[in-house]
Amino acid sequence: MSAQEAERPRPPDGGPAEGGPLRGLPAVDRVLRSEGAEALTALYGRPRVLEAVRAALERARREGRGAALTAILEEASARLEASMRPSQRRVFNLSGTVLHTNLGRAPLAEEAVAAAIAAMRDPSSLEYDLEAGRRGERDSHVAGWLTRLSGSQAALAVNNNAAALVLALNTLASGRETIVSRGELIEIGGSFRLPEMMARAGTRLSEIGTTNRTHLADYAEAIGPESAVILKVHTSNYAVSGFTASVPAKKLAPLCRERGIPLVEDLGSGSLVDLERFGLPHEPTVAEAIAAGADLVTFSGDKLLGGPQAGLVVGRADLVAKLAKNPLKRALRLDKIRLAALEATLKLYADPDRLCLRLPALRLLARPQSEIADAASRLLPALAAALGDKATAAVIETKSQIGSGALPVSLLGSAGLALRPAPGISVESLARAFRALPIPVIGRIEGGRLVLDLRALEDEAALSEELPRLAENLP
Ligand SMILES: *Cc1c(COP(=O)(O)O)cnc(C)c1O
């Protein structure tokens, strides 16, 4: 018995202490000696069982109620189970935003999952050249695919696109100027603000043009002895419309070449294939940016590409080599798990005809509305039954968005279920009940209703199976 357990006087049989605040409660050591507690100890280990039993007793005492040993064990067991549940959990993303940054962006292809698991389990040739029998390059596993798919000379991979941009600017423009149009000084979700990122990369921002209009002459006039990079940024999460002008890479590239200044383009989502092929709106592809004359292009691995979180840089071999030599590259490099998943994802692009079936991000984005509506009709009866008189449910047409800043203005026709709470029940409490399911369901609140967009729902069976438990969570 530990010193803490022994601190309170208690009768020799380990029963409730006489007359104290523990009246009607079993003593800690009696609970711990019980069969139930031994079973818990086998699962969770003694220190945690002791902690949970103490907490359960403490709560009963605070609430001034007696409790039987079984009740204390039950509460301890529930506490232990809750504390063992992973903090990062699987959820159903029915938010209508397919590549939702808060929900982990792109779901990976089975091929990528398998490759990641294999890389985790055993030693690998991560940085080992098997042919030569000496140290190799970790990015070599993906560089070949990236250059082939983008028509570029060289490629490297880092932690995410923000890192790719910082690495590019720090390598090419540290202590000097980077020219950016005022129409492209983006913020992507609070923590990514281009001017702040540039300052941390050690480059001075030279803003040119205006919010709505920037011309080639603005770039030409801004170039001076301190200019190191011209940066173009894909305005991925907003659209400027009306009286606007911007200079595409194709127009900018000849100027950059003439003045000997690298043109870096941050594509953000950067698709590796033309999405129109899958009936989706056009998003600039990496190959197009390279063909237009960008010297370096940066993009994310977990947006439209549909792979793990990564930042990819493709472009001129001499510039990529400079980036690779920057000590920051070491700080920003990818681990073997993600490199394996990325390599497997890129391989899927070698067969564009089957890409849409095998790559979940594209499969979900290209899903026809009629198919989604069918899923909604199938789920409606079980959902209505689970809601009882707490809310009404109806199949609706809705619009999904791609998310992660891709194609901000183009929405995809989708379908789902709209739940309207009964009088006296708030839509927030309805949303909370769905989030409290074993696999939390994340919908979106719209006009007093909870909307579940089913575009990203592939595992209908798992959702149906847990719906009956909704009643436990409803107010
Ligand atoms: C998403 C995005 C980024 C940031 O990419 P991460 O991979 O999230 O770091 C940077 N620039 C643009 C244009 C983006 O759309």
Image: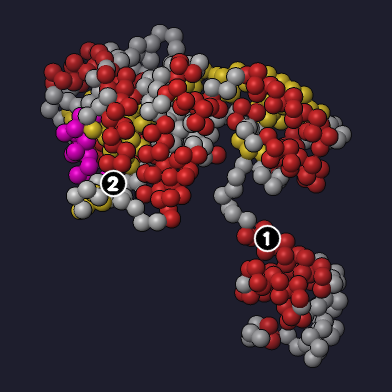
Q: Main secondary structure of the magenta part?
A: helix
Structural distance between the alpha carbons of marks 1 and 2:
40 Å
Q: Position of residue 166 (x, y in %)?
A: 30, 39
Circle 2: residue type? Arg
Q: Secondary structure at mark 2?
A: loop
State the residue at coordinates (18%, 16%). 255
Foreground residue among 11 and 284: 284
Q: Residues within 10 Å of mark 1 (few under 14, many from 20)?
A: few
Reading the chain from its start, which is encountered first: label 1 or label 2?
A: 1
> Which portion, as a residue range, is magenta?
315-330
Amino acid tagged 1:
Glu
Looking at the rendered image, the quarter that the N terminus falls into is bottom right
Is residue 455 in view from this perspective?
yes
Within 8 Å of ligand 1, the CB of disc 2? Answer: no
Identify the image quadrant of residue 309: top left
Asked whether, in this view, residue 464 is left or right of residue 293, the answer is right
Residue 395: x %, y % from top left: 74, 22
Residue beneath disc 2: 138
Measuring 74% from the left and 27% from the top, which residue is drawn there? 378
Identify whether 369 is placed above or below 421: above
Residue tagged 1: 81
Determine whether, in the image, residue 175 is placed left or right of residue 145. left
User: How many marks overall?
Assistant: 2
Expressed as whole percent of the image width and height from the top left, the position of residue 471 reads: 81, 43
- Structure colour scheme: secondary structure
Residue reaching furthest to the bottom: 12
The magenta stretch spans residue 323:
yes
Above or below, 448 against 429 in this view is above
Q: Please name the residue shown 26% across and 19% down the image.
A: 291
Residue closest to the eye, 309 or 39: 39
Position of residue 103 measured from the top left corner of the image (x, y, whole percent): 55, 39
Res. 190 in view? no
